Amino acid sequence: MQPGRQYGFTPEARAELWERWKRGESISDIGRALEDAALSELIRVIHAENLEVYGAPRIHIELREEHGVRVGRKRVARLMRDLGLRVCIGAVSASQEILVSACRCSRTSWSATSRR
């Protein structure tokens, strides 16, 4: 069996997998790296669609419930960290709707902000 056939990758991804396998890399490590790349793109899309207010727990739930992707919350957190995605804490109006214009993410960690 060719490497990658069991993962259901596209022909281009299988070709890359084949070349990396010929160089001596482990098939499971290569498969995980390719899955991480695809999952990272999906995480980036979900994060952007939700106005950058979804953290790893909510993205994990949406991946499972809306997209049918079974993945661990800690893996989602690691990929978000690798991508540099952080939660943007924006202003909330009286009707509890997030104001897009007020959400200017400063890319600072939550622990660095004041908690009042």
Image (cartoon, rainbow, N blue to C red):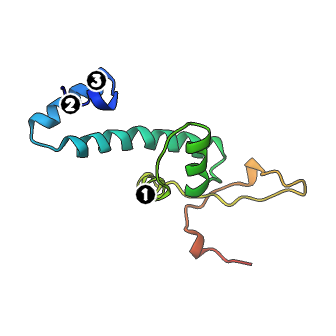
Q: Residue furthest right?
A: 94
**Relative horizontal placement of residue 55, taking residue 15 as reference (left or right):** right
Residue drawn at x 55%, y 39% is 45
Q: Amino acid under label 1?
A: Arg
What's the residue at 17%, 30% (across, down)? 18
92 lies above or below 1: below
Which residue is rendered at x = 59% and y = 61% of the image?
106
Q: Which mark is residue 3?
A: 2
Which one is closest to the eye, mark 1 or mark 2?
2
For image coordinates 33% across by 28% down, the residue present is 9
Q: Which residue is mark 1?
A: 78
Q: Secondary structure at mark 3?
A: helix
Q: Quadrant of residue 115?
A: bottom right
Instruction: Report x, y in % for residue 89.
Output: 68, 61
SS for dot 1: helix
In the image, residue 79 above or below residue 26: below
- Callout 3: few (<14), some (14-19), or many (20+) C-alpha neighbours within 10 Å? few
Mark 3 is on which residue type?
A: Glu
C-alpha separation, residue under disc 1 versus residue under disc 2: 26 Å
The residue at which mark 3 appears reads as 12
The answer to whether one can see residue 2 in this image is yes
Q: Considering the image in quadrants, where does the N terminus appear?
A: top left
- Please tell me how crowded label 1 is: few (under 14), some (14-19), or many (20+) other residues with Cα within 10 Å: some
Mark 1 and mark 2 in contact? Answer it, CB < 8 Å: no
